[in-house]
Each structure stands twice: as structure tokens, then as C-alpha cells.
Amino acid sequence: MGQFKDNTVLEAQKSRLKPPPMFKVMLLNDDFTPMEFVVVVLQKFFAMTREKATQVMLAVHRDGVGVCGVFPRDIATTKVQKVAAYARRHQHPLQCVMEET
Ligand code: TYC
């Protein structure tokens, strides 16, 4: 416990703050978006290596859905919006969604 020269004692208080809610950001599979485009998205917006991005893309292709990362609400929202804008700009139907963990 912290004790000062004047004998003041500061009691550590238990934090009453809940940790913030976290959100999984996920890609959905579709039949049209090229595999290479999905790999680029995962590298560009989720800071994955090409190897990791390829693994995640193939998992989404196989399973229908896959997690790209887990983030606080604002960051997850921004990622979903940026991926949507980038996919639309390139005229691909790639869907990116978020869900609370
Ligand atoms: N299924 C797509 C194809 O065969 C590839 C793909 C993977 C698309 C992942 C979307 O989130 C996705 N070209």
C-alpha cells in the first residue's frame, strides 16, 4: 500500500469499470469475389501477412464465414465500413459483418 511521509495511506480501490464490449469482425463467403481480392483485403485492413491472409481466406471459402479480428465497437465499425467501401469500389459483393463476442 502506498504510504507518504505524512503517514497518508492510499487504499487501492477495485476498478468498477467493466471492460468494453468486444466485436468479432467477420468475412462472409460468396461465389463471385476473387480469392486474390479477399487476400488483399485481409492484408490491407487487418494487417495480416500474405500467408495468414491466405489461410483465413481459405477458411472463409470452406466454412462460409471466418473471423478477421476482435476489436472495440468503434474500431470494428470502421473496419466493416472500410471493407464495404473498398469491395463496392471494386464491384465485388464481399460482405463484412460484426458481432458482439
Ligand atoms: N468463394 C470465393 C471464390 O471461390 C472466394 C471468397 C473467399 C469470397 C472468401 C469471399 O469472404 C470470401 N472466388
Image: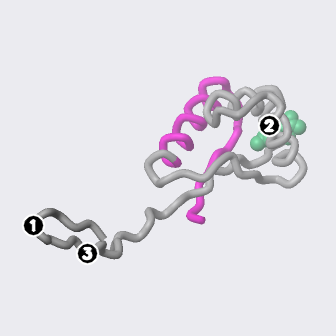
Contact check, label 2 and label 3, Cβ < 8 Å: no
- Badge 3 marks a residue whose secondary structure is loop
Give the crowd class for mark 1: few <14, some 14-19, many >=20 residues within 10 Å: few
Q: Is residue 4 found inside the magenta-colored segment of the image?
A: no
The residue identified by callout 1 is 6
- Beta carbon at label 1 within 8 Å of ligand 1: no
Of the two numbered discs 3 and 1 on the same chain, state the one appearing first in sequence.
1
Q: Is residue 76 left or right of residue 60?
A: left
The residue identified by callout 2 is 52
> In the rendered structure, which amino acid carries the disc numbered 3?
Glu
The quarter of the displayed image where residue 63 is located: bottom right
Contact check, label 3 and label 1, Cβ < 8 Å: no
- Disc 2/disc 3 C-alpha distance (Å): 46 Å
Examine the rendered structure and indicate whether residue 86 appears above or below residue 70. Answer: above
Q: Which residues are magenta?
A: 76-101
Residue 90 position in % (x across, y down): 66, 24
- Quarter of the rendering occupied by the C terminus: bottom right
Give the crowd class for mark 2: few <14, some 14-19, many >=20 residues within 10 Å: some
